Image (tube, grey):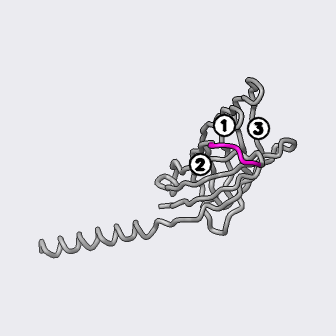
Amino acid sequence: MHKFLTTTAATVLTLGLSAGLAQAETYDAAAKGMGTNANQVYGISDGNAVVKTQTDYNSFEVTAGHPLEGATGSCFGALLVNGAVVSGTGNCVFDTTSGDKAVMTWTATGLGADGALTGDWTVSGGSGSWASATGSGSFSSLTDPDTKKFVNTITGSITIE
């Protein structure tokens, strides 16, 4: 009887681990996020400023079935612009169509030739399927200064457990 229980327990454990591993899915994070910003710029001197960032996403252009399909939410943080050198960080909270929240952290690394804010992002967790999600990549966010509308081009990958 002991051998039967040991074998059964080992089989159940193996099946449970296999099922858990099989459920993780990695997605290409290639996307375009769109929305508006409400940034506040605090001019310090010519070419130097501190920016309190606030962007509100109203849509993502992604492939069907992508975990950010239909997501909306906000990103916020702060930037220090010192001539061509840009630094800063912040967080994003997205409400997904599954009802889960996705949390991401961004770090600014520079400005593109077109004036887009560039940097890196990582998945920082969330709720539901996002609680143990991982992922990272880069972004390039360009805002029209007249309309305050932006397009954030995102690359990388996201793994949902």
Check disc 1 and report the residue beneath it.
85
Between disc 3 and disc 1, the foreground one is 1
Q: Name which residue lies at 62% across and 64% down.
A: 66
Q: Relative to 37, say whether 69 is above or below.
A: below
| C-alpha gap between disc 3 and disc 1 | 22 Å
Q: Relative to 88, say whether 160 is above or below.
A: below
Horizontal placement of 103 versus 9: left or right? right
Frontmost residue, 27 versus 96? 27
Check disc 2 and report the residue beneath it.
120
Check disc 3 and report the residue beneath it.
38
Q: Name which residue lies at 62% across and 43% down.
A: 109
Under mark 3, the amino acid is: Ala
Mark 3 and mark 1 lie on one chain; the one further toward the N terminus is 3
Under mark 2, the amino acid is: Asp
Q: Is residue 122 magenta?
A: no
Q: Relative to 111, say whether 20 is above or below.
A: below
Q: Point out the stretch of residues depicted in magenta.
A: 109-113
Q: Residue furthest right?
A: 146
* Magenta highlight: main SS: strand
| C-alpha gap between disc 2 and disc 1 | 15 Å
Mark 3 and mark 2 lie on one chain; the one further toward the N terminus is 3
Residue 144 in picture, x, y percent from top left:
83, 46
Determine whether the residue tagged by mark 1 lies in a helix, strand or loop.
Answer: strand
Between disc 2 and disc 1, the foreground one is 1
Q: For the N terminus, give its image quadrant.
A: bottom left
